Image: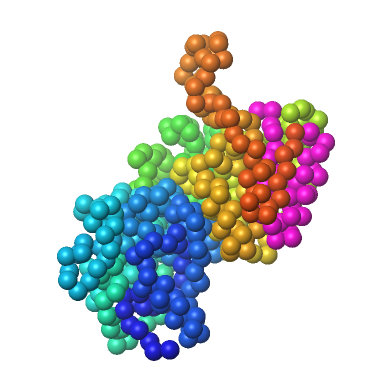
């Protein structure tokens, strides 16, 4: 087939050279040149990104985010004009908060039918134009946004946007591409390069040495982390550091799995009980290690580690840091371990005493969890702790959990077992992103089971029909577990926080709390999925096994679990 060089080919060539695996799109009418380029790619048997047809813009962005969070690789999302960009906004905002690199594009027309030689179609003039350009919609929560100003700059602008997305701090970038630019002839650069991988920053030797010395002298160090497990090597390096000096680890509001939960140095998910015992607190990739922000350790030296500990996307942040060790977190942890080994850090007796102390504390926490699980087993309706326990017993060890709950998050982090890197993901930002993250994780790890843990309220924020449709079309079967308490429990508890003795508390008249939801188990019926509703705790494990079996057969599955609270 004759090669056509236009803006569509420029876009596809940029994606190829950025090493993008997937173009994930809720398609719009402006992207015909890209669809043509993709058709030529297949006919000519040219290597390049695979197109994923997505049914909703939020879903498209979150699928890309989920894939990137598992693989670390930048992906591309094509959205429709201004309205599609608005639909995708919550996903873009989540990528911004979570520092996930994604290249987002949407289109427009800028001739509006006045060019006698080109008809962009009337929708641009009547409904789709945005005063000042579509990038105005996403300026506040993208790392960079702009417009492709010319067919002669389109290719390099896309490459530059992709490169910027992957630089520290990482995040989504956006390029608006007018249809007039896409249909215009494109002359490839004389030399087309494979885009170089983003370099990784490294902390200074002085900061590593200073931290190693502080740790060596410390009697009661404490590690708090949120995202050390962004990379599997970071997870492994954190384990090495903790074991070397017997430092306990707390995961404070984690968005990744960061440390094996069964490890004797894992101290759960609340740093509060341990802060004032510590003389050194090491914050490892954590934006908000305690709450309220001023409630940090009373007498400890605080050290913040990470690529960019001070978050420009946060309105307020109070790390109380005495030292910053800034650089790629995985590399920094490895350098710190090597420095400590070289210096013969600590003292064997002190470290052994500390190890025994924190192992006893870990065992005490675990015993409390087991007691709670035993007490929950036969409660009716089903106790959320028992649901979490049953999940741990039924699901395989390599399960990836994507969790989007509010009131049940504490039970899930305590009682659902995961031990490995990338076995747990939590969205950044608002509700409505969990199913997309689950699909992205499944796209990245097709051979592993993916389980979306969803509150009934959180589920209803998601594009449910579209998610199940894409799962079928793209052959991405996954299991959804609905934590169904029939309420926005967070709304009720927040109300009672402010009005504990108010009219609602005394009368039971709440607003915005009750959810008259559908029969969730039937939502998968149009997609030939398996659905089951369970209310009896004795039947819970079998229901979970049924859902898992359906996924293993290539079907989507949903188990609606009716809970007591």
Q: Nearer the viewer, residue 269 or 388?
A: 388
Q: Quadrant of the N terminus?
A: bottom left
Q: Position of residue 36 (x, y in %)?
A: 40, 76
Residue at position x 53%, y 26% in the image: 513
Residue range (magenta)? 536-565
In this picture, is 45 found above or below 28?
Answer: below
Residue 247 in sight from this viewpoint: no
Task: Please name whichever residue, 547 or 333, is drawn nearer the observer in this view of the structure.
Answer: 547
Picture quarter with the C terminus: top right
For this view, does 443 lie left or right of residue 551? left
At 49% across and 69% down in the image, what residue appears?
A: 51
Nearest the eye: 454 or 79: 79
Query: Horizontal placement of 475 versus 96: left or right?
Result: right
At 45% from the left edge and 44% from the top edge, which residue is drawn? Answer: 429
Horizontal and vertical percent for residue 43?
Answer: 49, 83
Residue at 69%, 32% in the rendered image = 563
């Amino acid at each position: 087939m004759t090669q056509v060089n236009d803006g569509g080919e420029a876009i596809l060539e940029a994606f190829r050279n950025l090493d993008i695996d997937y173009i994930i799109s809720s398609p719009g009418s402006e992207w015909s040149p890209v669809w043509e380029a993709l058709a030529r790619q297949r006919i000519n048997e040219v290597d390049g990104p695979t197109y994923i047809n997505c049914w909703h813009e939020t879903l498209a962005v979150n699928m890309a985010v989920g894939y990137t969070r598992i693989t670390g690789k930048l992906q591309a999302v094509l959205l429709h004009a201004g309205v599609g960009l608005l639909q995708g906004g919550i996903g873009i905002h989540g990528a911004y908060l979570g520092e996930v690199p994604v290249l987002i594009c949407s289109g427009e027309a800028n001739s509006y039918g006045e060019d006698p030689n080109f008809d962009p179609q009337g929708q641009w003039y009547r409904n789709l134009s945005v005063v000042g350009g579509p990038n105005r919609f996403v300026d506040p929560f993208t790392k960079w946004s702009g417009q492709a100003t010319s067919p002669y700059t389109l290719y390099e602008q896309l490459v530059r946007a992709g490169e910027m997305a992957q630089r520290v701090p990482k995040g989504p970038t956006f390029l608006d591409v007018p249809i007039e630019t896409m249909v215009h002839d494109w002359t490839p650069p004389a030399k087309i390069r494979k885009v170089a991988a983003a370099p990784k920053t490294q902390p200074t030797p002085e900061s590593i040495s200073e931290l190693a010395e502080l740790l060596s002298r410390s009697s009661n160090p404490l590690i708090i982390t949120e995202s050390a497990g962004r990379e599997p090597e970071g997870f492994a390096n954190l384990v090495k550091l903790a074991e070397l000096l017997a430092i306990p680890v707390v995961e404070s509001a984690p968005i990744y799995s960061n440390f094996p939960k069964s490890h004797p140095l894992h101290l759960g998910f609340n740093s509060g009980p341990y802060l004032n015992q510590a003389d050194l607190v090491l914050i490892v990739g954590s934006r908000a290690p305690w709450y309220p922000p001023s409630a940090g350790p009373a007498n400890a030296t605080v050290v913040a580690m990470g690529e960019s500990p001070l978050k420009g996307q946060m309105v307020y942040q109070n790390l109380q840091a005495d030292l910053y060790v800034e650089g790629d977190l995985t590399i920094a942890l490895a350098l710190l371990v090597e420095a400590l080994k070289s210096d013969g850090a600590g003292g064997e007796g002190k470290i052994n005493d500390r190890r025994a102390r924190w192992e006893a504390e870990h065992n005490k926490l675990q015993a409390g969890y087991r007691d709670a699980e035993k007490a929950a087993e036969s409660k009716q309706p089903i106790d959320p702790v028992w649901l979490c326990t049953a999940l741990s017993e039924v699901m395989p060890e390599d399960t990836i959990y994507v969790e989007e709950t509010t009131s049940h998050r504490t039970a899930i982090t305590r009682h659902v077992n995961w031990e490995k890197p990338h076995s747990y993901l939590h969205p950044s930002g608002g509700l409505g992103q969990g199913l997309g993250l689950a699909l992205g994780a499944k796209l990245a790890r097709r051979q592993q089971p993916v389980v979306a843990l969803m509150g009934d309220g959180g589920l209803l924020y998601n594009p449910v029909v579209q998610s199940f449709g894409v799962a079928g079309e793209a052959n991405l079967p996954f299991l959804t577990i609905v934590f169904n308490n029939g309420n926005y429990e967070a709304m009720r508890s927040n109300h009672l926080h402010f009005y504990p003795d108010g009219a609602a508390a005394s009368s039971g008249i709440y607003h915005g709390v009750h959810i008259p939801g559908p029969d969730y188990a039937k939502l998968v019926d149009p997609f030939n999925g398996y659905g089951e509703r369970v209310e009896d705790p004795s039947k819970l494990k079998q229901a979970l096994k049924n859902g898992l079996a359906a996924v293993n057969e290539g079907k989507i599955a949903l188990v609606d679990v009716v809970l007591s609270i």
